[in-house]
Image: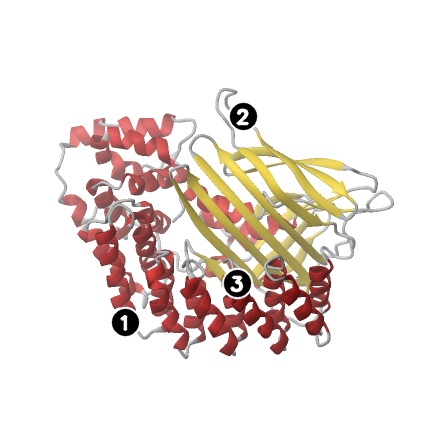
């Protein structure tokens, strides 16, 4: 499970690093035409695949967000202020499956009339990470207006890795990012991340009536934060204005920016006095003077210009006696939240019995901030050695929390998902322990009939990437609950081998729920497919009358055209005869015209 640093990259990669579109004109641009009170809704789809880690260990995270994005113009006096809210339809965010309740929060954005974003305003009390999630919905829609004849331009911005300048080239109606340069404001001696652009393509905006009508873009970047960290990002985004009636949006109830500040946060507990749990009290005790005067770790954290999980882990490994300071550091309001996050992740990477015990103490302590507890649970997925008995018991007891609300439910689902990741992490060096945990997950799956619980357990088995789990996962396609079948398709995406692909293809042929069919098609598209699987997809395209299902089938076949060119071309030509969606028709024509 990602660190706080990576968590922010995950959601901003599709925004700050996907970024600016361009509006081309034959004359000097006049800017977007906004009218106070205007309400607009868009269909919104974003898919981002993140590969992150260092040379010793890489992990993958697949994030998918789709739904309806609604806007209301609040002010046009100088710059433009929009109230924005998102109504999720599908959220796939492995870090926290319950994130949609936060993505639904209304917020506002202030921008120039040429589209450049100036500032955001989010509900008061929202933590930094969740605020990034909201901002990441809008950052990909940042638009730069320009005159015709412009060949290139630059844009300064920043993300959680620091300030950067992005350079763009304009060729016809296509815009490509040519370079991203991070800037170190502190020292010339500290390496800044380098960005390698593998692929970048965005369409130019052509209509200034209102805000946007449509935007599309895709990008493939590698961010190398040498020598410690590398993040590979593949992102696609699609925005289309909705012309028909849509459900009422929370953004439409916002009359002024100050209304945003008083919006209540979901499942937010009042802060409590921090207390050390009973388990922590069983640790060998130091005198009060020793705990008060020992600040070596605190000084190291606060005085480091840049903190990295790998270097902090090495430091803690060499100075494990300083772990006694951890609870005091977490309780110290002067320690930044991001530093606490890196510390917790480093404890997970360190993985010693004492480090695990500290993480458990934080995760179980309901007197701590909810976000800190949640990060401690995520840190367990960094373990590269078997969890202690008490940690394993905590993780697998996550199913007991599914009936609760708020942070308890979040911790429960994330604990189960983390158990699957740990199995993958330790399977090479500790195969017997990995197998034992895997068997416990399967037994838990056999015990529960609740669709939410089963779905999370199935996804956890997918996180193991164990080919031997393919059959156990695939058997859940027989469930009457379509949400369980969606979880099954998503889990099989991560399982290598023919068993998983065959199960997906066979279910595709008999599936009658569109959302499940789309999940199956997207999971198949993450694998190398043979003639049999591609034929199953072709049959789905020809037999389905639903544009959304056909769209996913078209994308998959287009991506695998080189594997079966004749099948793809023949299928597209047949499907065109009955295609009612202009977008789908364009995709098919483009698919076999290349």
Could you say which quadrant of the image residue 535 lies in?
bottom right
Q: Is residue 69 visible?
A: no
Where the C terminus falls, by quadrant?
bottom right
Residue where numbered disc 3 is placed = 530
In the picture of the structure, the residue carrying the numbered disc 2 is: 185
Please say which color scheme the image uses: secondary structure
Q: Secondary structure at mark 1?
A: helix
Check disc 3 and report its element: helix, strand or loop.
loop
Position of 470 with respect to 559 (left or right) is left
Q: Nearer the viewer, mark 2 or mark 3?
A: 3
Q: Decide which of tag 2 and tag 3 comes sooner along the chain.
A: 2
Whether residue 279 is visible here, answered yes or no, is yes
The tag on residue 446 is 1
Which residue is at a point 52% across and 20% down the rendered structure image? 188
Label 3: how many Cα within 10 Å (few below 14, some 14–19, many 20+): few
Q: CA distance from mark 2 to mark 3?
A: 51 Å
Closest to the observer: 484 or 526? 526
Q: Mark 2 and 1 residues: CB-CB less than 8 Å, in contact? A: no
- Camera-side residue: 431 or 448? 431
- Pick whichever of labels 2 and 1 is earlier in the sequence: 2
The foreground one among 525 and 130 is: 525
Measuring from the top left, give residue 220's x and y in whole percent.
58, 45
Q: Is residue 94 left or right of residue 145?
A: left
Query: Of helix, strand and loop, which one carries label 2?
Result: loop
User: Image point 53% across, 59% down: which residue?
Assistant: 65
Disc 2 versus disc 1: nearer the observer: 1
Label 2 CA crowd tier, 10 Å (few <14, some 14–19, many 20+): few
Image spot of residue 487 (x, y percent): 42, 67
Between discs 3 and 1, the one toward the N terminus: 1
Q: Are marks 3 and 1 in contact (CB under 8 Å)?
A: no
Residue under the point 49% across and 20% down: 189
How far across and how far down the image is residue 560, in percent? 59, 59
């Amino acid at each position: 499970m990602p660190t706080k640093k990576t968590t922010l990259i995950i959601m901003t990669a599709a925004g700050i690093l996907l970024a600016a579109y361009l509006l081309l004109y034959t004359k000097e641009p006049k800017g977007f035409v906004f009218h106070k009170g205007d309400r607009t809704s868009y269909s919104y789809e974003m898919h981002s695949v993140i590969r992150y880690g260092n040379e010793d260990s890489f992990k993958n995270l697949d994030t998918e967000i789709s739904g309806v994005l609604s806007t209301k113009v609040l002010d046009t006096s100088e710059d433009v202020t929009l109230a924005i809210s998102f109504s999720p339809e599908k959220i796939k965010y492995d870090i926290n499956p319950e994130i949609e309740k936060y993505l639904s929060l209304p917020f506002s954005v202030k921008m120039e009339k040429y589209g450049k974003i100036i500032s955001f305003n989010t509900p008061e009390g929202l933590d930094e990470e969740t605020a990034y999630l909201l901002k990441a919905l809008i950052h990909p829609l940042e638009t730069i207006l320009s005159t015709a004849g412009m060949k290139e331009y630059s844009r300064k911005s920043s993300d959680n890795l620091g300030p950067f300048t992005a350079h763009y080239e304009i060729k016809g109606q296509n815009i490509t990012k040519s370079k991203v340069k991070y800037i170190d404001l502190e020292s010339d001696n500290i390496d800044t991340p380098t960005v390698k652009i593998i692929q970048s393509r965005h369409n130019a905006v052509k209509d200034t009536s209102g805000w946007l009508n449509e935007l599309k873009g895709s990008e493939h970047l590698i961010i190398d934060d040498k020598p410690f960290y590398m993040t590979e990002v593949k992102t696609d985004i699609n925005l289309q204005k909705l012309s028909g009636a849509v459900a009422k949006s929370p953004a439409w109830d916002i009359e002024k920016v100050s209304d945003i500040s008083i919006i209540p946060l979901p499942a937010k507990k009042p802060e409590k006095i921090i207390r050390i749990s009973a388990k922590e009290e069983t640790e060998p005790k130091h005198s009060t003077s020793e705990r008060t005067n020992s600040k070596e770790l605190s000084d190291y954290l606060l005085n480091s210009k840049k903190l990295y999980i790998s270097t902090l882990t090495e430091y803690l490994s060499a100075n494990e006696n300083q772990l006694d300071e951890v609870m005091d550091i977490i309780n110290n309001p002067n320690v930044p939240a991001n530093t606490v996050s890196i510390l917790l992740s480093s404890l997970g990477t360190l993985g010693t019995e004492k480090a695990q015990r500290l993480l458990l103490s934080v995760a179980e302590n309901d007197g701590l901030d909810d976000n800190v507890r949640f990060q401690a649970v995520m840190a367990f997925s960094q373990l590269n050695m078997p969890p202690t008995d008490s940690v394993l018991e905590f993780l697998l007891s996550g199913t007991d929390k599914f009936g609760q609300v708020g942070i308890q439910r979040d911790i429960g689902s994330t604990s189960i998902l983390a158990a699957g990741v740990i199995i993958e992490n330790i399977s090479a060096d500790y195969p017997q322990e990995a197998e034992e945990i895997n068997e416990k997950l399967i037994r838990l799956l056999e015990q529960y009939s609740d669709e939410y619980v089963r779905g999370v357990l199935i996804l956890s088995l997918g996180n193991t990437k164990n080919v031997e789990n393919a059959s156990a996962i695939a058997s859940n396609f027989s469930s009457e609950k379509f949400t369980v079948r969606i979880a099954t398709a998503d889990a099989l995406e991560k399982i290598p081998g023919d068993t998983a692909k065959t199960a997906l293809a066979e279910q595709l042929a008999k599936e009658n729920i569109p959302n499940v069919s789309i999940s199956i098609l997207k999971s198949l598209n993450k694998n190398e497919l043979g003639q049999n699987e591609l034929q199953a997809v072709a049959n789905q395209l020809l037999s389905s009358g639903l544009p959304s299902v056909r769209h996913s089938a078209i994308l998959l076949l287009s991506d695998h055209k080189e594997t079966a060119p004749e099948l793809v071309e023949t299928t597209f030509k047949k499907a065109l005869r009955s295609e009612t969606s202009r977008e789908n028709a364009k995709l098919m024509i483009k698919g076999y015209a290349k």
